[in-house]
Image: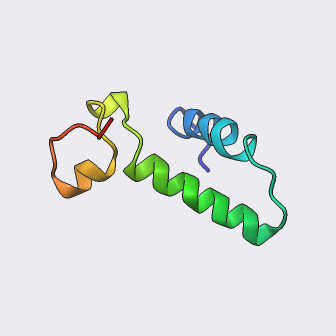
Amino acid sequence: MANNSFGEPLNGKFRAECLNAHWCLSLDDARAKMEESRQDYNTGRPHSAIGNKPPISLMNGSSAAAPP
């Protein structure tokens, strides 16, 4: 990941919420857990910087807030 002001906060969140939160039993297991985390980050979690909507809502053109 990038080493800049945009990438560093994401790196820290990813490490705290995914890598530090799970034991990975193999490389395939790690990949599956990282993909699950990526999907949640992009489609399920609201982001305050974009009006408490998940990033996928920007791609879909939705102005609706994320479900509670």
Query: Image quarter for residue 64?
Result: top left
Residue at the (65%, 59%) spot, across then down:
33
Which residue is most to the bottom?
28
* Colour pattern: rainbow
Q: Position of residue 43 (x, y in %)?
A: 38, 52
Residue at the (57%, 61%) spot, across then down:
35
Q: In this image, 64 relative to 50: left or right?
A: left
Residue at the (68%, 35%) spot, across then down:
16
Considering depth in this image, is 50 or 28 the residue closer to the camera? 28
Q: In this image, 26 relative to 31: left or right?
A: right
Residue at the (29%, 40%) spot, across then down:
67
- Quadrant where the image shows the C terminus: top left
Query: Image quarter for residue 7?
Result: top right
Q: Position of residue 6 (x, y in %)?
A: 50, 37
Please say if 24 is above or below 50: below
Q: For the image shown, how many numbered marks are present on the structure?
A: 0
Q: Position of residue 1 (x, y in %)?
A: 62, 50
Q: In this image, 21 relative to 36: left or right?
A: right
Q: Position of residue 41 (x, y in %)?
A: 47, 47
Which residue is most to the front?
68
